[in-house]
Image: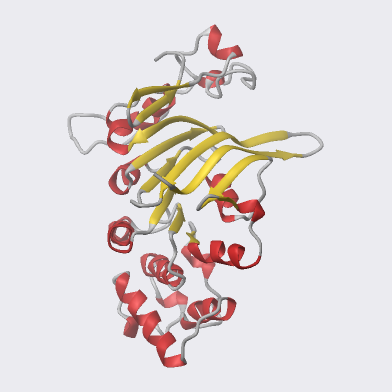
Amino acid sequence: MENLLEIQNLIKVFSSRRNRTTAVDQVSLSLPDASPITVAVVGESGSGKSTLANLILGFTKPTSGRIIYKGKDITHLRGKEKENYRREIQAVFQNPFDAYNPFYVIDHTFEQVFGHFQFDLTKDERRRLVEKNLEQVRLDPGQILGKYAYQMSGGQLQRIMIARALLLKPRLLIADEPVSMIDASLRVTVLDVMSRLKRQQKIAQLYITHDLSTALQISDQIIVMYKGCIVESGNAQEVIMSPAHPYTQLLISCIPVASTEEKWNEHLHIMESRSDSAQGCCFYDRCPKAAENCRFHKPEQTALSEEHYVSCFLI
């Protein structure tokens, strides 16, 4: 089966005179072409999730490794192929309020897309296309067009961003914490829109979040990252319901439980840093179960099932 997107041993190192940080460390993943899926990338702040998104979007260049789209390394794309990649890989970012110029009405957001990419459409056809895409994200064009961003809620602004991306008929939507700054009452609406786009328009999605609850709700597969490394991956239900890596177990233990009998574990019981773990497991320095072997050797990926993998010596 061919892949729409394939990432092979991707590494991104940020260096300065005093520090050297590996933000993405030997990351590999794939998104199938024939049957679009949603892959959630989860982890704490600083785990490398957003850096991974920026690498795929071409905002930053990898130190090593390959990002292959439809069989071609994106670093080799030129001219028309590069423009098509920009059209087909679209993003929705965390803060919807930062995406709009307060001096322009919402219409300007769509006009920018028409201005940057070739559209063989009349003015009326463009208007109808915008209205159609707004309706696809469950918005009434009459209540959106001609208005300013400050007149919209966060949920509306985020759905407008999705509608804007739909103008380009994307094959992959990268959503970086798209509901973290939206009221809880509106998160379900945005996530439902994303789910319907995958089913109805066959748009694959990379959903980046620290929220395991929404990751389970929307994703087919989950990748858990810590310090730039993938520590666990696989079928969303398996990873959340049967976590194998100590880090994943700690994350899941902090998910609030809707029960009067069970108390919410508010804090991750992660140990204070033991020492530099650059030689061994990325989680060695804070893992409550770490052995001496974890300090000096990186664990290989172990298959727990056909769709569940973990990188840990304790398995």
Question: Could you tell me which residue is drawn at 55 percent across and 20 percent down?
Answer: 281
In depth, the one of 232 and 170 nearer the eye is: 170
Question: Could you tell me which residue is drawn at 36 percent across and 65 percent down?
Answer: 155
Q: Where is residue 58 shown, x and y percent of the image?
A: 61, 55
Which quadrant does the C terminus fall into?
top left
**230 horizontally vs 133: left or right:** right
Question: Could you tell me which residue is drawn at 37 percent across and 85 percent down?
Answer: 128
Give the quarter of the image for residue 16: top right
Question: Compared to 25, does 303 lie above or below?
Answer: above
Q: Where is residue 185 shown, x and y percent of the image?
A: 28, 58
Q: Is residue 146 among what the camera can see?
A: no
Question: Compared to 122, does 35 lie above or below?
Answer: above
Question: Compared to 149, does 29 lie above or below?
Answer: above
**156 horizontally vs 84: left or right:** left
Q: Where is residue 197 shown, x and y percent of the image?
A: 32, 62
Q: Where is residue 258 shown, x and y percent of the image?
A: 21, 39
Please identify the residue farthest to the right as the structure is shown.
17
Q: Is residue 309 among what the camera can see?
A: yes
**257 horizontally vs 100: left or right:** left
Question: Could you tell me which residue is drawn at 66 percent across and 62 percent down?
Answer: 78
In depth, the one of 159 and 301 nearer the eye is: 301
Marker count (numbered): 0
Question: Compared to 252, does 118 lie above or below?
Answer: below
**182 horizontally vs 120: left or right:** left
Which quadrant does the N terminus fall into?
top left
Give the quarter of the image for residue 130: bottom left
